[in-house]
Amino acid sequence: MTNGMREIRLEKAVVNIGVGEAGERLLKAEKVLKMITGKKPVRTVAKTTNRDFGIREGMQIGCKVTLRGDEAMEFVKKALYIRDNKMAAYSFDPVGNFSFGIQDYTDFPGMKYDPEIGIFGLDVSAALGRRGKRVQIRRILRAKVPKYQRLTKKEGIEFVKSKFGVEVVD
């Protein structure tokens, strides 16, 4: 019998397209995310000003969709299949979360190239965790999660290998 609190799970997957400018390209990126995920995207805002790129603080520069539960699992499986079920070890952070990019949205099954939209790449970030992590996030009675309850990079890699059948390359 295993302890349910020690079980690792995919908490959420965030699909992001960074455009770098507001306007028509941002609308096209939103359209792409809606086609791929079936969810309405949320716009992301620049936190700082960067004159070299012509970005001002507060300017809308991208869009994202957050998926949770079974939707997140299915999307990550599809996205990893596009990557030939291979990931680099540096894609994992010290607490087991992982991120990777996809070059073109037309790689997804059922997606065709639309000359009106063009080519858009996207980033997928997945957050892993164990039950009880909410204790460090909630507003009332916030507490630290003990070290044995936190994930490590090694555990994150093992989870991805077993759950998604991914080969992790160094």
Image (spheres, rainbow, N blue to C red):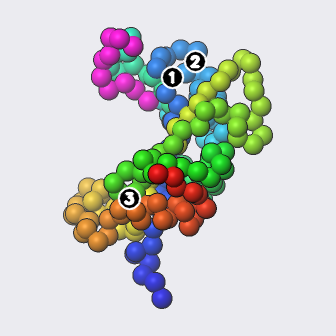
How far across and down, in percent of the image, does residue 59 sit? 39, 19
Among numbered discs 3 and 2, the one appearing first in the sequence: 2
Residue at 51% across / 22% down in the picture?
19
Looking at the image, which residue is at 35% across and 56% down?
A: 95
- Left or right, 140 with respect to 152, comes to left
| SS of the residue under disc 3 | helix
User: Viewed as shown, does residue 47 lie left or right of 157?
Assistant: left
Read off the residue under disc 1: 19
Task: Tell me if label 1 and label 2 are in contact, CB under 8 Å.
Answer: yes
Closest to the observer: 128 or 83?
A: 83
User: Sequence order check: which comes first, mark 1 or mark 2?
Assistant: 1
Kindly report the distance in space between the C-alpha atoms of the residues bearing marks 1 and 3.
30 Å
Whole-number angstrom distance, CA of label 1 to CA of label 2: 7 Å
Residue picked out by circle 3: 153
Mark sitting earlier along the chain (1/3): 1
Q: Estimate the spatial distance between the alpha carbons at disc 3 and disc 2, rounded to whole Å.
A: 36 Å
Q: Tell me the number on the disc at residue 25.
A: 2
Binning the other alpha carbons within 10 Å of mark 2 as few (below 14), some (14 to 19) or many (20 upward) gives some
Q: Is residue 63 above or below residue 68?
A: above
**Dominant secondary-structure state across the stretch colored magenta:** loop
